[in-house]
Image (tube, helix red, strand yellow):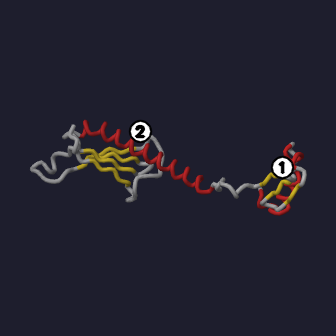
Amino acid sequence: MADDAPVRIADAAGGAAGGARGSPAEGRAWGPARVAGGPHLNKLAPGGRLRHLPSGLVVSSQQVHSQHNNKPTAMKMLKAALYQRAVDEREKKKQAVEATKADASWGNQIRSYVFQPYTMVNDHRTSLKVPDVQRVMDGDLDRFIEAYLKQYGSRAA
């Protein structure tokens, strides 16, 4: 096979490849990809074009002068394009989740616990201050939950 063989991957809708899922085996169409020029212009169709119908992705292969030999190559290219599309989609979802995360740096904490020289727990969301740190450390969080629900109400759910 030639390393500089013409290969084209395009979205049938005109956009960039990315978005749909599916196996290349389900819903595909194979057809000739005619090349320009030469005395055998209307007689030969050495290349092949493989279209994945569910996603509209089109892959064209003209590596060898036989449609039958180009079809497996086009199938591999289609699988790779669908895989890349799925990876890109997963990455977009991951970035959307990452964008919604709050910064966990200093100053963005929910509560402050002071043990020395005095004891106090300060809830920064509700401005509730509880002087008994040991009870809070033992799991008594009911005051904080009640204060949060009073302040934020139905938005908390």
Tell me where residue 61 appears, x and y as whole percent. 27, 44
Cα distance between the residues tagged 1 and 2: 65 Å
Q: Nearer the viewer, mark 1 or mark 2?
A: 1
132 and 86: which is toward the camera? 132
Q: Tell whether 120 sits left or right of 59.
A: right
Q: Tell whether 18 sits left or right of 1.
A: right
Tell me where residue 120 appears, x and y as whole percent. 86, 54
Residue for badge 1: 115
Picture quadrant where residue 4 is located? top left
Picture layout, residue 87 above or below residue 13 = above
Rendered-image quadrant of the N terminus = top left
Looking at the rendered structure, the secondary structure element under dot 2 is loop
Residue 25: mark in rendering: 2
Picture quadrant where residue 130 is located? bottom right
106 and 67: which is toward the camera? 106
> Would you say the residues marked 1 and 2 are in contact, meaning their CB atoms lie under 8 Å apart?
no
Type of the residue with mark 2 = Ala
Residue most extreme to the left: 39
Numbered-mark total: 2
Q: Tell whether 63 sits left or right of 120.
A: left
Residue visible at 68% across and 55% down in the picture: 106
Tell me where residue 97 appears, x and y as whole percent. 60, 53
Residue visible at 23% across and 44% down in the picture: 62
In primary-sequence order, the first of circles 1 and 2 is 2
Type of the residue with mark 1 = Phe
Q: Tell whether 21 sits left or right of 140.
A: left
Residue visible at 20% across and 40% down in the picture: 2
The crowd level at tag 2 (other Cα within 10 Å; few <14, some 14-19, many 20+) is few
